[in-house]
Image: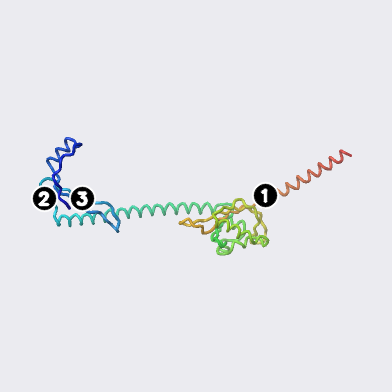
Amino acid sequence: RMTVPSQDVPPDASEAQAEFIRRHPMSAIMGVPLVARGRLLGGISLVRYGRAGAYVEEDERFLRDLADRSALAIDNATLYREAREAAAARERAEKSSRRLMAIVESSEDAILSKTLDGTITSWNRGAERLYGYSAEEVVGKPVSILVPPELPHEIPEILEKIGRSEMVEHFDTVRVTKDGRRLNVSLSVSPLLDGAGNIVGASAIARDMTERKKVEEELHWTLKELADMKFALDESAIV
C-alpha cells in the first residue's frame, strides 16, 4: 500500500479526464497478487480518490482476504473448465475408438495386433475367417503359429523394421491356417504407438491372395500353351 502524491494532469488527457483528475485526485493505492496452488493468476488493487487518507493495515487484511477468495474462485473455475474439456476429449476418443473397432470387426481382411516380441494381442473376425482360429485361441500366443517352418526369420525381420518406425506394405508371403492349409497373402504391417508416441507393437492386415495366385498361375500356363501352339503352327507352316 502507498500514498500517491498530487498528480499533474497528463498533457494527452481529454477534457473529461482532466476534469475528473482535478475533482477526484488519487490519494492512495493498494494491490496484492492473486495466487492459487503456487501459480500467479493476476492481481487485484484498490484505488482511493479524493481527500481520504492512506490505506491502513485493516484495509490490507481485507484486500488479501478478498484476493484469496478471488484466486480460489478463479482456480476452481479453471479446474472445472479443464475437467470438462478433458471429459469431452475422452468422450471423443472413446467414440473414435468404438468407430475404429467397428470398422476393424466388419473388415473382410484379417487384422491383428501384436507386441514387439510377436505376441498376438487382438484378432478380428476377418482373421478368424481367414486362419480358422478364434480370438480366444490365439490372443496371447506367438504370431509365429501362422508362419510355415521354412520362413522362420520372416517375423523377426518384420518386427525389426517396425521397431525402426518403418512400415511393411503389400508384402506377398505364405501363411498357415489352423487346419494346415497354406494361403498366399498380402501383408501390410505398421507400428502401434502409445500416448507418448513410443512404438509398443504392430498392426498387421492380411488379404487372401490364394485365388488370385491361382488365376495368375492358370493364366500363365494358358499363355504358355498358346505360345507353344503358335510355335507348332509356325513350324508346320515352314514345312
Determine contact: label 2, label 1, CB under 8 Å: no
Q: Which residue is mark 3?
A: 45
**Within the image, what quadrant is residue 121 found in?**
bottom right
Mark 2: which secondary structure?
Answer: loop
> In the orientation shown, which residue stands out farthest toward the top?
15
* Disc 3 residue crowd, few under 14, some 14–19, many 20+, Cα 10 Å: few
Q: Nearer the viewer, mark 3 or mark 2?
A: 2
Q: Position of residue 157 (x, y in %)?
A: 61, 58
Say whether disc 2 or disc 1 marks the residue closer to the N-terminus: 2
86 or 155: nearer the viewer: 155
Identity of the amino acid at label 2?
Gly
Q: Residues within 10 Å of mark 2 (few under 14, many from 20)?
A: few
Give percent across and percent down for residue 179.
66, 61
Q: Residue at x 78, y 46 (%)?
A: 225
Mark 3 residue type: Ser
The nearer-to-camera label among 3 and 1 is: 3
Q: Which residue is mark 1?
A: 212
Q: Which residue is mark 2?
A: 53
Which amino acid is tagged 1?
Answer: Arg
Residue 225 visible in the snapshot: yes
Left or right: 90 as drawn, with respect to 144? left
Q: Position of residue 74 (x, y in %)?
A: 28, 53
Note whether residue 124 is visible.
no
Marks 3 and 1, Cα distance to the nearest angstrom?
79 Å
Disc marking residue 49 = none
Classify residue 151 by image quadrant.
Answer: bottom right
The disc, 3 or 2, on the residue closer to the chain's N-terminal end is 3
Residues at marks 3 and 2, CA–CA distance in whole angstroms: 16 Å
Name the image quarter holding the C terminus. top right
For the residues carrying marks 2 and 1, which lies nearer the camera in this image?
2
User: Where's residue 84, x and y in %?
Assistant: 36, 53
